[in-house]
């Protein structure tokens, strides 16, 4: 699979160094020494092992448009943005009300400015928005029809210079793709992920839809040292 070359800067594919990861994850430490540290260790491990956020931050750096993060989980991207010096207004939505509640508590406790987190099922609707949109490791939880419809709707939200930044496992015949599918099934079975993965998009399908809508589009691997088939897809409204 080759990348469409509209962005020639090499993509950052290394996860955070240990200390930087700890500095961001620290926000998720419990208020009390004996409190639950699950979210702290989850975010710390994610930041230390997955190149997701460095790649996404790089994609968003050229724009100051407000960002809507679909399937934001705990709102970790907002913390990564602020640690990177990116002050763009941030709205995150997720179907998991417990994650949103905990994410809001952390935002309030750490005093992150211009950050809003809301409960929303992407299968049902979208908030009004004009700016950039991020969809990170979420598309596979929607049916192929809903993925297409959602992407059409978010493409319409992009203002000039804004970006649609997607990270997704892609369906192909590689062993990476199989590993992504099996791990998602296990995550749901073990209760780590409430939602079940339904369908992975293909590179051809995503590229066709984004380029068909006039976005300058790049697809690049963003799996780092992980065994998954994760790619970063960036569409720029020129
Ligand atoms: C693998 S996590 C990714 C979280 C975050 N985007 C990140 O990259 O750290 C997938 C997220 O998608 C959310 N999600 C799944 N289906 C959804 C839906 N129909 N509407 C909104 N959020 C959904 C899950 O609750 C979960 O927080």
Image (cartoon, rainbow, N blue to C red):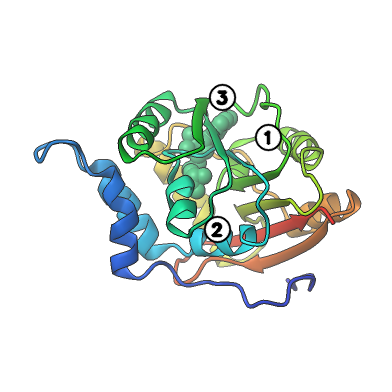
Residue under the image location 48 percent in, 65 percent down? 51
Residue under the image location 42 percent in, 37 percent down? 193
Tags 2 and 1 touching, CB below 8 Å: no
Nearer to us: label 2 or label 3: 3
Marks 2/3: CA–CA distance: 29 Å
Residue under the image location 79 percent in, 70 percent down? 4
Task: Examine the image and state in which quarter residue 108 appears.
Answer: top left
Task: Say which label, 2 or 3, has the lower sequence index.
Answer: 3
Q: Nearer the viewer, residue 3 or 88?
A: 88
Marks 2/1: CA–CA distance: 18 Å
Q: Is residue 47 above or below residue 135?
A: below
- Quarter of the figure that contains the N terminus: bottom right
Q: Position of residue 46 (x, y in %)?
A: 38, 56
Residue receiving disc 3: 120
Q: Position of residue 176 (x, y in %)?
A: 55, 64
Q: Is residue 13 above or below residue 52?
A: below
- Residue 113 visible within the image: yes
Q: Nearer the viewer, residue 167 or 160?
A: 160
Residue under the image location 50 percent in, 64 percent down? 54
- Quarter of the figure that contains the C terminus: bottom right
Residue receiving disc 1: 143
Q: Position of residue 70 (x, y in %)?
A: 59, 38
Q: Position of residue 147 (x, y in %)?
A: 72, 38
Residue 178 got which mark? 2
Confirm if mark 3 falls within 8 A of ligand 1: yes
User: Badge 2: how crowded within 10 Å, few (<14), some, or many (20+)?
Assistant: some
- Apparent side of residue 215 relative to residue 114 in the rendered image (left or right): right
User: Badge 1: how crowded within 10 Å, few (<14), some, or many (20+)?
Assistant: some
């Amino acid at each position: 699979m080759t990348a469409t070359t509209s962005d020639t800067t090499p993509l950052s594919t290394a996860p955070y160094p240990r200390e930087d990861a700890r500095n961001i994850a620290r926000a998720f430490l419990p208020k009390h020494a004996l409190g639950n540290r699950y979210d702290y260790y989850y975010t710390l491990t994610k930041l230390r092992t997955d190149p997701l956020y460095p790649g996404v931050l790089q994609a968003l750096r050229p724009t100051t448009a407000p960002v809507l993060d679909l399937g934001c989980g705990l709102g970790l991207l907002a913390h990564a943005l602020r640690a990177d010096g990116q002050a763009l207004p941030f709205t995150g939505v997720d179907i998991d009300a417990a994650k949103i509640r905990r994410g809001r508590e952390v935002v309030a406790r750490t005093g992150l400015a211009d950050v809003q987190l809301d409960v929303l099922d992407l299968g049902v609707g979208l908030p009004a928005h004009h700016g950039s949109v991020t969809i990170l490791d979420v598309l596979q939880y929607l049916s192929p029809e809903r993925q297409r419809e959602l992407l059409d709707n978010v493409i319409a939200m992009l203002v000039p210079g804004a970006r649609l930044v997607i990270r997704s496992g892609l369906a192909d015949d590689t062993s990476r793709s199989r590993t992504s599918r099996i791990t998602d099934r296990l995550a749901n079975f073990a209760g780590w992920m409430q939602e079940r993965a339904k369908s992975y998009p293909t590179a051809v399908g995503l590229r066709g839809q984004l380029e068909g809508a006039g976005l300058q589009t790049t697809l690049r691997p963003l799996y780092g040292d992980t065994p998954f088939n994760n790619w970063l897809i960036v569409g720029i409204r020129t």
